């Protein structure tokens, strides 16, 4: 007769063995699942590492730059307003729309100044009336559509231009609805997954003199601006009988785009030279006001001379003229002296 105690012992042994077998099987299954997850993660990371240089390269790839001697590398200013020229050109290379985006020095607001293409303006560079569309088409300056338009806008507005964006896209307009729509998209997190696609599109359809890093900085500044701080001004208000009124333009600019940093500086500015009308407009439009005039000059080179520490207006005037500020003592005691040479128009228009 078998020992019942032995049977009980065997039963407990078999039950324990079955339990540990199930536990081991469960642990093995969990290890396999973890191993599978680890393999998937490693594969995804490896794939990301392989693709990342291409993505980074795509983001850091410089945008197309219009080759020109008058539009240097784009700048973002922290001491005064940043003025950016926006140009829309069709795929057939006809001018569609022109605007100026002026970002305040505090980065709290931006004013979009839309510039109509058809009204005429008098240009001393060609000594005739012409529109922006005509300037773009006929290329009166430096045999370049862009250069001719760029100079025409600078002459029309008498404002420094810190950078430009040229878009090649049919029917692109810089109206209020379009700008607010872009602002809303940049504010939305849904734009992030489409970032690479946008960059590819911009590579093919946009030219700018801003570096990639500056572009992201501008986009971030634009994103942070409240919707009620987007202002829109149309130069149609300054057109009388299809002709721009420069005095009305200057009044509109001083009302909407005054640079408080320059106006508060109250620098005394002396202007020497004969062809000084455009320079006077620039000084007034950027916020300067106190001027001393003189026609006596034998200088063959246009200069901006700084004689004090009030350098904001000097930097902006020099930026408009595309020259460097020179530091030296000014006999009259003025803070800034602008010397307009007899060759000014040749230097400015490239004629």
Image (spheres, rainbow, N blue to C red):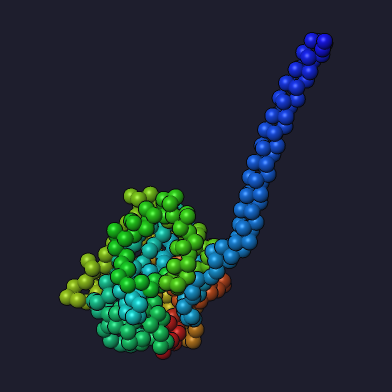
The quarter of the displayed image where residue 26 is located: top right
Q: Residue 12 location in percent, x, y? A: 76, 17
The quarter of the displayed image where residue 168 is located: bottom left
**Image quarter of the C terminus:** bottom left
Residue 250 appears in the figure:
no
Asked if residue 77 lies left or right of residue 287, the reply is right
Q: Residue 232 location in percent, x, y? A: 30, 59
Asked if residue 33 lies left or right of residue 294, the reply is right
Give the residue at x 53% y 74%: 324
Give the residue at x 46% y 78%: 66
Give the residue at x 69% y 29%: 22
Residue 181 appears in the figure:
yes
| 261 up-or-down from 325: above or below | above
| 199 up-or-down from 326: above or below | above
The quarter of the displayed image where residue 185 is located: bottom left
Give the residue at x 53% y 70%: 62
Comparing 121 with 292, the one in front is 121
Q: Residue 251 location in percent, x, y? A: 28, 65
Q: Residue 133 location in percent, x, y? A: 29, 79
**Image quarter of the N terminus:** top right
- Residue furthest out toward the left: 241
């Amino acid at each position: 007769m078998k020992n019942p105690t032995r049977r009980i012992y065997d039963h407990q042994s078999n039950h324990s063995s079955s339990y540990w077998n199930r536990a081991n099987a469960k642990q093995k299954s969990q290890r396999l699942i973890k191993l599978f997850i680890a393999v998937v993660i490693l594969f995804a990371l490896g794939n990301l590492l392989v693709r990342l240089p291409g993505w980074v390269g795509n983001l850091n790839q410089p945008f197309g730059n219009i080759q020109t001697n008058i539009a240097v590398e784009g700048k973002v200013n922290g001491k005064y307003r940043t003025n950016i020229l926006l140009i829309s050109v069709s795929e057939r290379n006809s001018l569609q729309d022109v605007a100026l985006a002026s970002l305040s020095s505090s980065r709290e607001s931006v004013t979009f100044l839309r510039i109509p293409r058809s009204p005429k303006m008098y240009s001393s560079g060609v000594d005739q009336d012409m529109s922006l569309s005509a300037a773009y088409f006929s290329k009166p300056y430096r045999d370049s559509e862009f250069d001719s338009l760029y100079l025409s806008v600078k002459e029309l507005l008498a404002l420094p231009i810190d950078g430009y964006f040229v878009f090649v896209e049919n029917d692109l307009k810089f109206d209020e609805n379009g700008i607010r729509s872009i602002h809303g998209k940049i504010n939305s997190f849904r734009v992030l997954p489409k970032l690479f696609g946008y960059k590819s599109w911009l590579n093919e359809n946009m030219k700018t003199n801003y570096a990639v890093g500056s572009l992201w900085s501008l986009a971030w500044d634009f994103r942070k601006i409240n919707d009620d701080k987007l202002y829109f001004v149309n130069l149609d208000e300054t057109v009388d009988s299809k002709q721009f009124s420069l005095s009305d333009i200057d009044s509109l600019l001083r009302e909407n785009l005054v640079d408080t940093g320059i106006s508060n500086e109250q620098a005394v500015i002396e202007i020497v030279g004969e062809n000084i009308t455009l320079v006077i407009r620039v000084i007034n439009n950027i916020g300067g006001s106190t001027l001393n005039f003189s026609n006596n000059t034998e200088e063959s080179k246009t200069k901006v001379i700084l004689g004090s520490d009030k350098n904001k207006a000097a930097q902006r005037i020099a930026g408009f003229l595309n020259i460097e500020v020179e530091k030296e003592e000014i006999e009259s005691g003025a803070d800034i002296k602008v010397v307009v040479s007899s060759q000014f128009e040749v230097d400015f228009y490239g004629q």
